[in-house]
Amino acid sequence: MMNFKWEILGIAETHWIDSGEFTMVGYKILCAGKYTIHRAGVALILNKQAQNALLGYNPISARIMSARFQTKTGAITIIQVYAPNTADTENNVDDFYDQLQHEVNKKPRKDILMVMGDLNAKVGDNNS
């Protein structure tokens, strides 16, 4: 029996323009970015085994993308995020979390869910 090792690296704040996929040195890069401005952006970098397990992906916005993979025991949905920070408007923050919740709700019920990335969390009493 062959033992495959998946390698998936999530990146937040890529600053890449546009969304799509490309291959570099044997790794597939799935990305979601803004169309004209080098801001935000998320990506997943997949090795050959992860590429073979990829069922599909969805670049939702420059801050959220999802990808679905088939494993030996079932499917897994990975949502890569780059959350707005506290300097952003309340509407932008609310829109981000609404989109994230929508993606979580869309995942097939039996899938394992992994949400990863930069959630711009603040820790401690002084959150300024």
Image (spheres, helix red, strand yellow):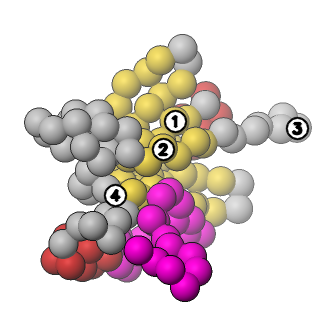
Distance between the Cα atoms at labels 2 and 1? Answer: 8 Å
Mark 2 crowd level (few <14, some 14–19, many ≥20, 10 Å Cα): some
Q: Which residue is mark 1?
A: 45
Per the image, is 50 magenta?
no
Numbered badge on residue 59: none
Q: Secondary structure at mark 4?
A: strand
What's the amino acid at mark 3? Met
Sooner in the amino-acid sequence: mark 4 or mark 2: 2
Q: Residue furthest bottom?
A: 125
Q: Which residue is mark 2?
A: 11
Q: Which residue is mark 3?
A: 1
Q: How many marks?
A: 4
Sooner in the amino-acid sequence: mark 4 or mark 1: 1
Give residue 98's quadrant in the image. Answer: bottom left
Q: Which residue is mark 4?
A: 64
Distance between the Cα atoms at labels 4 and 1? Answer: 15 Å
Image check: 76 left or right of 41? right
For the point 26% across and 56% down, which residue is it? 60
Mark 3–mark 1 CB contact (< 8 Å): no
Give residue 72's quadrant in the image. Answer: bottom right
Q: Secondary structure at mark 1?
A: strand
Residue 1's x, y, as percent? 88, 38
Mark 4–mark 1 CB contact (< 8 Å): no
What's the amino acid at mark 2? Ile
What span is colored magenta in the figure? 100-128
Distance between the Cα atoms at labels 4 and 2? Answer: 11 Å
What's the amino acid at mark 1? Ile
Mark 2–mark 1 CB contact (< 8 Å): yes
Sooner in the amino-acid sequence: mark 3 or mark 4: 3
For the point 26% across and 74% down, which residue is it? 93
